[in-house]
Amino acid sequence: MQRHAPAEVKQSGVVHYTFLLIGLTLLVYVLHALDSILLPILFAALLSVLLLPLVLRFERWKLSRIWAIIFALLLVIVALLGMFYLFGSQIMSLRDELPKLQERAVQYFDQIQQWASHKFGYQPISKDQLIESGLESFKSSAGGYLGSTLSTTAGVLSVTTLVPIYIFCFLYYRDHMRQFLFRFVKPDRRTDVLHTMDSIQVVVQAYIQGLLTVIVIVSVLNSIGLLVLGVKFAVFFAIFASVLAIIPYIGILVGSAIPALVTLVDTGSPTKALGVVGVFVFVQFLEGNFITPMVTGSKVSINPMAAIIALILGGELWGTPGMILSIPLVAVLKVVFDANKNTEPWGFLLGDVSDGAELKLANSSAKEGFFMRAWHKLRPG
């Protein structure tokens, strides 16, 4: 009796996309539920990719892998401690000035109320009423603020402890993890996987290194402009605005509004406050049109709409850490999407309008990358 092969069951498009939506929903739920576990791992993975060239250089200097990783981590820790010291001293100085700024802010608020009352018949709110309403609002939400503060502090301490350990493990066991990934791939597909892994390494390194370089350059330019205007806490506001400037369109608004308001309250000069805004707008123009294209080129090119959506989704999913991780993860997703013909349109959607040869550039830069060289060394024959 002749046996026939079972007929292939074809799913309709509705069923296919229904299962896809269910899978995405479960994925989002798991990512949100396991945020305390996943966030340190993701931060460590990105930093490991960034530190890999430094570790390899130390290893070429005849250091063992363990000591190369330890020295690289020590350099990062020293750099972070220097940044915290600089920011901490500026924040302490700003805290000492807060009572004076608060008093002047109340005076300006009273003047605005008097003008509005004279012009539009607005009933002014007394200073005591304003303070009382603020105290009532603080009392009603004090428990939430306290719980949020304790939770955030515990999360920061946990991440600070776990991330260096994860970084050490990623860098130390990198060969072992690469062999683990190869066990899921057919031998004839391993070259493509190596190209994709090297492309991800190139993109992540280019993004983070370029981002840090841009932040340093923009911070210096902002500091020069604010110091020329005689703005208090110029260095702090310059670095603060430079970090926020990575958020397209929105970052410059927030980064310039706060120092402008502080300058207005401190000096009472609208002209000087507008000058502060002008400095940030001019530096932002230089950053968008000259600095970033020269520093990063087309190695990482995510269009502003995708970046804003990624920031919003990252913030909703994981809060502030999610916003920090969102754009690097989108850059990694773009490389992965571009490496597969079925998902290449999604990579094109995430790319910039002028993104024509980004994938070719990444692939050409990764042809003899770390993973490819290591594979040639490990492959028999």
Image (cartoon, grey):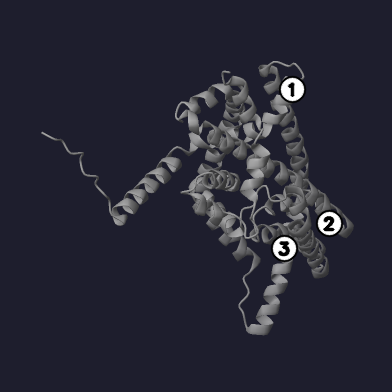
The answer for how far apart the CA atoms under marks 1 and 3 are is 54 Å
> Which quarter of the image is occupied by the C terminus?
top right
Q: In which quarter of the image is residue 245?
A: bottom right
- Contact check, label 1 and label 3, Cβ < 8 Å: no
User: Residue 103, percent across and down?
Assistant: 73, 60
Q: Earlier in the sequence, mark 2 or mark 3?
A: 3
User: Residue 272, percent across and down?
Assistant: 83, 65
Residue 116, which numbered label? none
Looking at the image, residue 327 sits to the left or right of residue 287; the answer is left
Q: In this view, does 294 lie above or below 42?
A: below
Q: In this view, does 35 lie above or below 136?
A: above
The residue at 34%/53% (across/down) is: 17
Q: Nearer the viewer, residue 194 or 140?
A: 194
Residue 58, which numbered label? 1
> Secondary structure under badge 3?
helix
The answer for how far apart the CA atoms under marks 2 and 1 are is 40 Å
Q: What residue type is labelled 1?
A: Phe
Q: Is residue 150 above or below residue 120?
A: above
Q: Earlier in the sequence, mark 2 or mark 1?
A: 1
Q: How crowded is mark 1: few (under 14 residues within 10 Å), some or many (20 or more)?
A: some
> Secondary structure under badge 1?
helix
Disc 3: which residue:
105
Q: In which quarter of the image is residue 283?
A: bottom right
The answer for how far apart the CA atoms under marks 2 and 3 are is 21 Å
Closer to viewer: mark 1 or mark 3: 1
Residue 226, which numbered label? 2
> Secondary structure under badge 2?
helix
